[in-house]
Image (cartoon, rainbow, N blue to C red):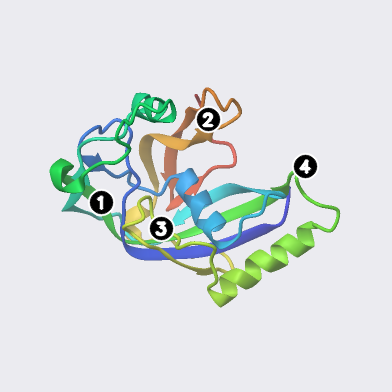
Amino acid sequence: MGYGIRLEAWGPYALFSRPEMKTERASYEVMTPSAARGLIEAVYWHPGLRWVVESIFVRNPIRFTNIRRNEVKAKILASDLRAACEGNNAPLFIDAKEQIQQRAASVLTDVRYIVSAHFEMTDRAKPGDTPEKFYAMAAERLRRGRTFMQPYFGCREFPAHVRLYEGGLPEPCEELRGERDLGHMLFDMDYANPKGIRPVFFHAKLVDGLLDLTDCGVKT
């Protein structure tokens, strides 16, 4: 196990899309592990380390609201890309004015989480890269509010504020005391085979506001 770190993240809206909802987006009740990893990587990413999310603590009560967003109803096809590469002059753009469509979305509102994670060294680390160095850089960036890119909650339209969290976890809010079954949730994407990237799911349970990911039994 590598060095552990905790960050607090909060924002007015979040959308962690459920994959079974095809047309109009609906969020999971809690931030997904992959979204939590994305928050940390937005602060500090390096090829010599790999972030592993251990737990997600939900500080605020879970609240949903409905919004409408402008989206496009089409996408560029892989066949069009191949045709363009072969010189067939296939269009490689989408006219937003022609393809715009308004869709509803069920999003989380007034969210606040504490993410506990650690990193593991990879074989791409250089001789001068050490766990102490990586930890110091990640912690300092969190303290100073520095990021490689804007952290966000599921979709880039919903930016997240992040900071280093030091100390133990607080008591859960009254609504989240006890156990809450969240059903099957996306854990992350398995990139082991670049030609066959697969989603990985797990059975999520929230216990006193804590989503423990240390032994969650992931399934492909």
Please give the label number shown on residue 175.
none
Q: Earlier in the sequence, mark 3 or mark 2?
A: 3
Give the residue type that dot 2 points to.
Val
Residue 35 is at least partly visible in this image: yes
Q: Which mark is residue 123?
A: 4
Residue where numbered disc 2 is placed: 218
Q: Nearer the viewer, residue 57 or 5?
A: 5
Q: Alpha carbon of mark 3 to alpha carbon of mark 4: how far?
A: 29 Å
In the image shown, does 206 or 20 lie closer to the viewer?
A: 20
Identity of the amino acid at label 3?
A: Tyr
**Cα distance between the residues tagged 2 and 1:** 25 Å
* Disc 2: CA contacts within 10 A as few (<14), some (14-19) or many (>=20): some
For residue 58, which quarter of the picture?
Answer: bottom left
Q: Position of residue 193 (x, y in %)?
A: 59, 25
**Which is nearer the N-term, disc 1 or disc 4?**
1
Cβ–Cβ under 8 Å for marks 2 and 4: no
Q: CA distance from mark 3 to mark 1?
A: 13 Å
Mark 3 vs mark 1: in front: 3
Query: At which x and y percent is residue 162?
Result: 48, 67
- Disc 4, SS: loop
Q: Secondary structure at mark 1?
A: strand
Mark 1 residue type: Val
Question: Disc 3 marks which residue?
Answer: 152
First in sequence: mark 2 vs mark 1: 1
Residue annotated with mark 1: 107
Foreground pick, 149 / 173 = 149
Residue found at x 14% / y 43%: 98
* In-image side of 152 versus 192 (left or right): left
